[in-house]
Image (cartoon, rainbow, N blue to C red):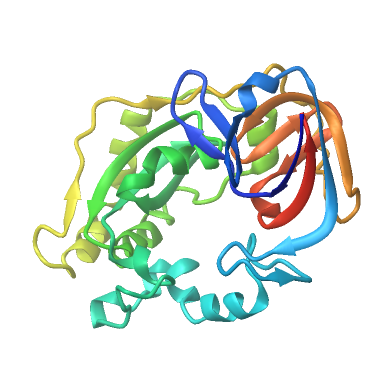
Amino acid sequence: MKINIHLKKLKSILKAPIEYYLIQDNGEILLNDWLGKSISFNYTGSIFCIQCGRKTNQSFQEGFCFPCLRRLQECDLCIIHPERCRIEKEGCFIGDWAHVHCHENHVVYIANSSGLKVGITRKTQVFTRWIDQGAIQGIPILHTKNRYQAGMIEVNLKAFIADRTDWRRMLRNDIEEMDLISARDAVLKKANFSLVKVINQFKEGDVQKLKTISVTRLKYPVLEYPNQIKALSFEKTPTITGFLLGIKGQYLILNTGVINIRKYAGYNVECML
């Protein structure tokens, strides 16, 4: 099967194993069905902005053209540094696409991706966030009214727990399951003094501790994990071909290397399945 598509972030559905879909204009393709089979992507040299659709010579911040990037830069404080978001001072207009996420309920979580980490995401996107990070376990710990509050709490917890994923370790699956309930309790105990001071800045009821007693476990569609990680790039190799050995995070794991599909959002490719 040969299709011409503008790459988009892989769609994922939490099942056992997780289902991954390649998005095209007229439908979706379940990539799990192609495990163990040959797959190829031929980059045509064209890139289209994922926000406005215009053709662009260069992609910025995973799929935006330069004008849309400049628009995004106006709200970088909210996207990259949610703890600097201006929503509490009514500085984020709810009708603005660049700020819409600021107004949504958020969750602060801990997950096991390449080890224990803390993160935040919209309440409606928790499972998707864990999948995108390649986590094998996750548990929500706090619920907040908006993104700023979640960001402030995350900054506080970063003093006690990592906030980044080692993507190479994640792709090697060099991870052991851990007791996230105990890890959550330990982190909240260590951070309690400073965390209470942060939470007390907000209105009563805006931040709620979640007494979750079950841990979500995530199983990825992978036939074989690589021992060595070779990152593939359309700039260096316009035609990428290999046998699909697995999918984890937003990465396709081929016998020839790994490629981050989300990184190349907006790239026009001819795909052979």
Image spot of residue 137 (x, y percent): 44, 29
- In this view, the residue in front, 271 or 142, is 271
Image position of 22 with respect to 95: above or below: above
Image position of 244 with respect to 258: above or below: above
Horizontal side, residue 73 vs residue 5: left or right? left
In this figure, what is the number of numbered marks?
0
- In this view, the residue in front, 85 or 267, is 267
Residue at (19%, 35%) from the top-left corner?
211
Indicate the quadrant where residue 189 lies: top left
Image position of 143 with respect to 153: above or below: above
Look at the image and tell me in which quarter the N terminus lies: top right
Image spot of residue 267 (x, y percent): 73, 55
Residue at (24%, 65%) from the top-left corner?
198
Please indicate, yes or no, whether residue 237 appears anywhere in the rendered image: yes
Residue furthest left as drawn: 204
Image spot of residue 248 (x, y percent): 61, 32
Please indicate, yes or no, whether residue 115 appears anywhere in the rendered image: no
- In this view, the residue in front, 116 or 62, is 62
Look at the image and tell me in which quarter the C terminus lies: top right
- In this view, the residue in front, 143 or 59, is 59
Residue at (44%, 72%) from the top-left corner?
98
Image spot of residue 142 (x, y percent): 26, 48
